[in-house]
Amino acid sequence: MSTIIIEVYEAFLSAGVPEDKARAAAKAMSDDQNATKSDINKLDKELAIIKWMLGIIITGIVALLIKTFIYH
C-alpha cells in the first residue's frame, strides 16, 4: 500500500492543483525513493573508482605536457 506525503499534498492543493493531480504527485514523491545505506555505500565505491581514474588521466596529461614542453 502506498502512502502520500500529507504536507506535499496540502501544498499542492493550496497552490491550486486539482485534487487528483495533487494526490498523484504526492504519492509519486513518497514511493520508496529514499536512499538506503546500501545505495550510499555503492555510490561511495563508484566515486572512489572515478577519483582514481581522474587521477590517472590528470597524471598522464601532465606527463605529456612535461614531455612536450620541457624534454622536446
Image (tube, rainbow, N blue to C red):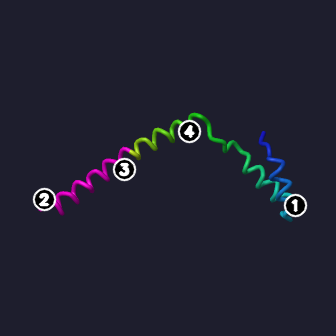
Could you tell me how far apart the alpha carbons at marks 3 and 2 are, in whole angstroms?
25 Å
Q: Secondary structure at mark 1?
A: helix
In which quadrant of the rendered view does residue 71 lie? bottom left
Q: Nearer the viewer, mark 3 or mark 4?
A: 3
Crowding at dot 1, Cα within 10 Å, few <14 / some 14-19 / many 20+, comes out as few
Amino acid type, label 1: Ser
Name the residue rendered at 62%, 41% in the picture.
35
Task: Tell whether position 14 is magenta.
Answer: no
> Which x, y percent locates residue 50?
41, 46
Q: Amino acid at mark 2?
A: Tyr
**Pointers 3 and 2 in contact (CB under 8 A)?**
no
What is the CA distance from the residue labelled 3 to the residue labelled 4? 21 Å
Residue 51 shown left or right of residue 36 in the figure: left
Q: Is residue 1 above or below residue 60?
A: above
Residue annotated with mark 2: 71
Q: Extreme front residue here?
A: 70
The structure residue drawn at horizontal position 66% and vertical position 42%, both measured from the top left corner, is 34
Q: Residue 68: name its quadrant.
A: bottom left
Q: Determine which residue is flagged by label 1.
A: 14
Q: Judge by depth and name the residue closer to the eye, 46 or 31.
A: 46
Of callouts 3 and 2, the N-terminal one: 3
Q: What residue is disc 3 on? A: 54
The residue that label 4 is drawn on is 40
User: Percent position (x, y) of residue 55?
Assistant: 34, 48
Q: Which mark is residue 26?
A: none
x and y, in percent, of residue 40 in the image: 56, 39
The quadrant holding residue 1 is top right
Circle 4: residue type: Ile
State the predominant SS element of the stretch in magenta. helix
Instruction: Locate residue 2, reporting x and y percent.
Output: 77, 42
Residues in magenta?
52-72
